[in-house]
Image: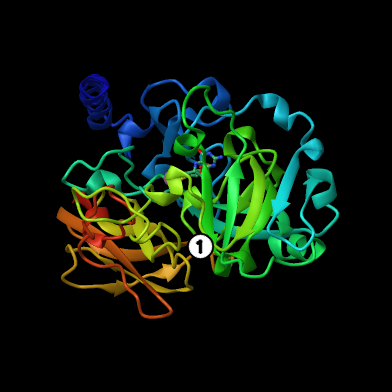
């Protein structure tokens, strides 16, 4: 029902913006700044023109609003909530927030104020939803129809988990997973295990893990998990639990639905089950961010973003003819580390005509973005370069 209204609206908007563009009033990507669904209250501080509002819990960064800087600003960063955000009172006195640690030699609770005394580190990392690129799956994978904007590269500041573990006497013997539990209030009368955001990751994630209280140098906003969030560089968004309340080490994964059957890669038509791969480490990926529609003939600056996921990024290549020929792109700006994305540039000399611009990234282990997506029920992990290519008119 909403979909048809949305589609109708989109046509109207594209129509009027298109008219403006042909009248020369707008140059690039005219629909980007058109009026749209207003931002929900809890994120009314974000930049409306930079975001697509899919629902009050799912907001996507527009493709043209990505890659202009090394990091994605808080105002442009996407939002994905499974549940309503907690009461804003929890960020009023952040240092009073307490977290319970279990499955360590000396289990106990610590306040954020105490955690801040243990150590501090900053890491740049890509935050990306498992379903980023879902909109390209032809089978109609259920869930938010993200294109490329359920992703951003941000700076997290917090205490490394290894220092927290040290302070707690070490991880209990026999542990294989770290589980983080989100602090949302759950509705009465429903099975909490079916709703709670509680995610387990293998212990190999712990070395890079951070309990973060700052996002891009600002106190972590409530919408992004303030006052405190588990940050797992290289791992898909869902594992980065917001408003983290409990952290536990254990031999088994959580028995919450989001872990047992949710976020599992499986063939189309199959239900989720614990023996299927979990959405943990991210794969190598890139996409073009400009130009996206029409551009003047001559020197064309083709730009985009690329990242290695859980592995270091080696290089990125650009094609102007849908993958028949590939050219080496060059990275722009400093390397913010293993888990950051890198904006890239390829300068092409293009005569008038239709072009299919594609990019493909390769990581240090030689894994390259595939041409085709791996079909799967929920539309997870799409890094196919063909899906992310853009058709551009050079005039
Ligand atoms: N507590 C809690 N943590 C959560 C979620 C949530 O709904 N609740 N959503 C997860 C998912 S699916 C994603 S993609 C990221 C999104 O982070 P963001 O909203 O800060 O962009 O948060 C993850 N952590
Ligand atoms: Mo997600």
Q: In screen coordinates, is 187 left or right of 325?
A: right
Residue 237, placed above or below residue 14: below
Residue 318 in view of the camera: yes
x and y percentages locating residue 337 in the rendered image: 58, 68
Q: Residue at x 44, y 31 (%)?
A: 49
Q: In screen coordinates, is 33 left or right of 382?
A: right
Residue 152 in view of the camera: no
Q: How is the image coloured?
A: rainbow
Q: Which quadrant contains ligand 2? A: top left
Q: Across the whole image, how many numbered discs are drawn on residues? A: 1
Q: In screen coordinates, is 226 left or right of 237?
A: right
Residue 74, quarter of picture: top right
Q: Nearer the viewer, residue 83 or 1?
A: 83
Residue 316, placed above or below residue 181: below
- Label 1, secondary structure: give it: loop
x and y percentages locating residue 286 in the rendered image: 36, 61
Q: Residue at x 81, y 62 (%)?
A: 167
The residue wearing badge 1 is 234
Q: In screen coordinates, is 57 left or right of 361?
A: right
Q: Residue at x 31, y 56 (%)?
A: 265
Residue 309, placed above or below residue 365: above
x and y percentages locating residue 112 in the rendered image: 78, 45
Residue 46, placed above or below residue 199: above
């Amino acid at each position: 029902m909403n979909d048809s209204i949305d589609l109708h609206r989109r046509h109207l908007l594209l129509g009027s913006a298109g008219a403006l563009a042909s009248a020369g009033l707008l140059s690039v990507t005219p629909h980007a700044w058109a009026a749209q669904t207003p931002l929900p209250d809890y994120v009314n501080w974000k930049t409306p023109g930079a975001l697509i509002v899919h629902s009050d819990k799912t907001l996507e960064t527009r493709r043209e609003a990505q890659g202009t800087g090394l990091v994605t600003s808080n105002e442009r960063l996407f939002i994905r909530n499974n549940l309503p955000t907690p009461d804003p009172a929890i960020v009023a006195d952040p240092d009073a927030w307490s977290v319970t640690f279990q499955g360590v030699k000396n289990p106990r609770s610590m306040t954020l104020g105490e955690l801040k005394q243990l150590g501090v580190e900053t890491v740049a990392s890509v935050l990306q939803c498992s379903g980023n690129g879902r909109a390209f799956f032809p089978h109609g994978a259920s869930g938010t129809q993200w294109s490329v904007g359920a992703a951003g590269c941000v700076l997290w500041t917090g205490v490394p988990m290894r220092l927290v573990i040290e302070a707690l006497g070490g991880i209990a013997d026999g542990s294989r997973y770290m589980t983080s539990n989100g602090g949302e209030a759950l509705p009465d009368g429903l099975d909490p295990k079916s709703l709670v955001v509680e995610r387990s990751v293998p212990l190999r994630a712990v070395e890079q893990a951070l309990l973060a209280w700052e996002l891009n140098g600002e106190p972590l906003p409530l919408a992004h998990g303030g006052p405190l969030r588990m940050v797992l560089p290289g791992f898909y968004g869902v594992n980065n639990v917001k408003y983290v309340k409990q952290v536990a080490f254990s031999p088994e994964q959580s028995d919450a639905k989001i872990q047992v059957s949710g976020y599992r890669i499986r063939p189309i038509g199959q239900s989720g089950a614990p023996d299927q791969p979990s959405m943990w480490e991210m794969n190598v990926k890139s996409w073009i961010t400009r130009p996206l529609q029409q551009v003047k003939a001559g020197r064309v600056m083709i730009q985009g973003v690329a990242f290695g996921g859980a592995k270091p990024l080696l290089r990125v290549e650009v094609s102007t003819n849908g993958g028949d020929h590939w050219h080496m792109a060059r990275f722009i700006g400093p390397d913010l580390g293993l888990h950051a994305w890198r904006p890239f540039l390829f300068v092409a000399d293009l005569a008038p005509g239709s072009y299919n611009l594609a990019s493909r990234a390769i990581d240090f282990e030689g894994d390259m973005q595939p041409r085709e997506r791996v079909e799967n029920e929920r539309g997870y992990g799409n890094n196919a370069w063909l899906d992310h290519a853009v058709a551009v008119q050079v005039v």
